[in-house]
Amino acid sequence: MKNFINILKLFIWNSNLVISKGIHYRFDFFLGLIITLMFTLTGPLIQYLLFTQTNGFPGWNLEQIILFQGTVLISFGLRNTIFGNSKREFIETVINGEFDKFLLKPFSPIALILASSFSIDGIGTFVAGMVLTIYSVLKIKLTITIWKLMLFLLCILLGLLLSAALEIIHSGCIIVTVADGGIRGIIDAYLRFSEYPLDIYPKYLKLTFISFLPIGIFAYFPSQVLLNRIDIKIIFSFISVISFFLISLVFWNSVLKKYTSAGG
C-alpha cells in the first residue's frame, strides 16, 4: 500500500511537471488542444453520418449514440492523458539501453514507466467527451442516481486498468523485440472495435469483446449504465478485465527475467 501511494505521488509530480511545461508555451498548448479536439470530433461525426445515412444501429437512437460517443471520448481521452507518453518513450529507452536505470530503483519498473507516461494530448478529447455526455444526459432526460454514477465511474476505472494491461503487454513485447514491430498498430486496431456499440457485431464477437478481450468496458457498458440497460454480462466483463491485468503482470515478469541490456 505504501509503494502504491508513493507511485501515485510520483505520477502526480510528473503530471504537474508536464502540465507546467505545456502551459509555459501557452500558444503551443492551446493550439495543440484545438487540433486534438478537431481530430477527436471526426469520430463522432463519422458515427453521426453512418447513423443518419443508414438504418442506424439496432437498439440505439441518435441521442443514445451521441451519449455512447461521449463515453468513448471520455474513456480514450483519459487513456491518452494517463498513458499517452508510455508508447512514445519506452521504445527509445530500451533501444538506447537506458531501461537499466529503472531496474536500480526501489519500485517496480513497469510502475515507474506508467507513472511517467502522463500526456496533455488527451485533455481535449476528455473535455469533448464530457460535453457530449452531459448534453446527451440532459437531452434524453436521464435520471442519474448515486448508484449509476458509482457504477459508471467503476467502468471508467476498469477501462483504465485494461488500458494499463495493454501498455504492460506492449512494453513487454518491446523488451523482447527491441522495437515496436507493429504491435502498437495491432493494439490500436483492436481498440477501434470499442468505438461502436457491441450490438452491431455478430454474437461470437460480442461475447469475445465482453468476456475474453473485454473492450466493452471502455464505452459500451458505461453508456449502458447511464441508459439503465445494464445486465449480468457486466460482471463477466469486470472479471475479465481484472484477469487480463493479472495476466499482463505475469507476462511482464516473465519477460523481465530474460531482459539483457539494450536488447531482448
Image (tube, helix red, strand yellow):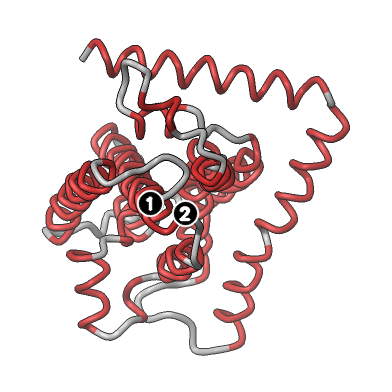
Residue on which disc 1 sits: 264
Residue on which disc 2 sits: 178
The foreground one among 91 and 220 is: 91
**Farthest residue toward the right?**
27
Q: Say what secondary structure mark 2 lies in.
A: loop
Q: Position of residue 136 (x, y in %)?
A: 52, 53
Left/right of residue 113 with respect to residue 19 in the rendered view: left
> Are discs 1 and 2 less than 8 Å apart at CB?
yes
Q: CA distance from mark 1 to mark 2?
A: 6 Å
Q: Identify the disc placed on residue 18.
A: none
Q: How many marks?
A: 2
Q: Position of residue 164 (x, y in %)?
A: 36, 43
**Farthest residue toward the bottom?**
54
Q: Position of residue 99 (x, y in %)?
A: 46, 34
Q: Position of residue 177 (x, y in %)?
A: 42, 59
Q: Amino acid at mark 1?
A: Gly
At x 33% / y 72%, what residue is drawn? 198
The foreground one among 52 and 154 is: 154
The foreground one among 213 and 48 is: 213
Q: Say what secondary structure mark 1 lies in.
A: loop
Q: Is residue 210 above or below residue 92?
A: below
Q: Look at the image and tell me whether residue 15 can be seen.
A: yes
Q: Look at the image and tell me whether residue 155 can be seen.
A: no
At x 61% / y 87%, what residue is drawn? 53
Q: Amino acid at mark 2?
A: Val
Dot 2 surroundings within 10 Å: few (below 14), some, or many (20 or more)?
A: many
Q: Is residue 239 above or below residue 11?
A: below
Reading the chain from its start, which is encountered first: label 1 or label 2?
2
At x 43% / y 30%, what residue is drawn? 100
At x 58% / y 44%, what residue is drawn? 92
